[in-house]
Image: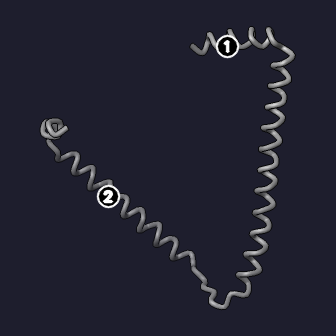
Amino acid sequence: MRVNQFKIAPRSLLKNSSTNLINIFGVAIGMTAAVFILMIRNEFSFDRYQLLANKRLENLTYRIHIGSCIFIVASCDALAIARASVGFQAIKAALANPVRSRRIE
């Protein structure tokens, strides 16, 4: 299917070459400009947000320092919970009767 499309595409481009080339280049330039504008807009909005957030957070009276120990404990807890749930499901699957589970489906 794709091979036929790749054979037909150059033929149709050559058949209406000037119109197709103008359309293809117009779409390509338009898409490039749109992506470029969105990228620039995103960068400027990020910089503006960072400046405003830093100014607001500098004057915050209830500032809390969170050490790295909290993040290490939280990640270890998350890994332990994931390991326990995967282990439970593995044991449950190993003990299941395949004939009975097939009947239920």
Give the left or right position of residue 104, taking residue 50 as reference: left
Q: Residue at x 41, y 62 (%)?
A: 79
Percent position of residue 97, x then y: 14, 41
Query: Measured along the vertical axis of the image, is residue 37 above or below residue 25?
Result: below
Q: Position of residue 32 (x, y in %)?
A: 81, 39
Image position of 85 (left or right of 15)? left
Mark 2 closeness class: few <14, some 14–19, many ≥20 residues within 10 Å: few
The mark tally for this picture is 2
Residue nearer the viewer, 25 or 49:
25
Mark 1: which amino acid?
Answer: Phe
At x 74% / y 8%, what residue is drawn? 11
Q: Can you say which quadrant of the picture contains the C terminus?
A: top left
Residue 51 location, x and y as percent? 79, 73
Q: Which residue is mark 2?
A: 85
Identify the residue shown where x is 66% and y is 91%.
Answer: 61
Work out whether 77 lies above or below 55.
above
Residue 67: name its quadrant.
bottom right
Q: Nearer the viewer, mark 1 or mark 2?
A: 1
Q: Using the rendered view, name the quadrant where residue 35 is placed.
A: top right
Q: Earlier in the sequence, mark 1 or mark 2?
A: 1
Looking at the image, residue 89 sits to the left or right of residue 29; the answer is left
Q: Are marks 1 and 2 in contact (CB under 8 Å)?
A: no
Residue position marked by numbered label 1 in the rendering: 6
Q: Position of residue 62 (x, y in %)?
A: 62, 89
Q: Quadrant of residue 63?
A: bottom right
Q: Residue at x 17, y 36 (%)?
A: 102
SS under mark 2: helix
- Secondary structure under tag 1 reads helix
For marks 1 and 2, give the CA distance: 50 Å
* Amino acid identity at mark 2: Ser
Please give the label number shown on residue 17.
none
Q: Nearer the viewer, residue 71 or 33?
A: 33
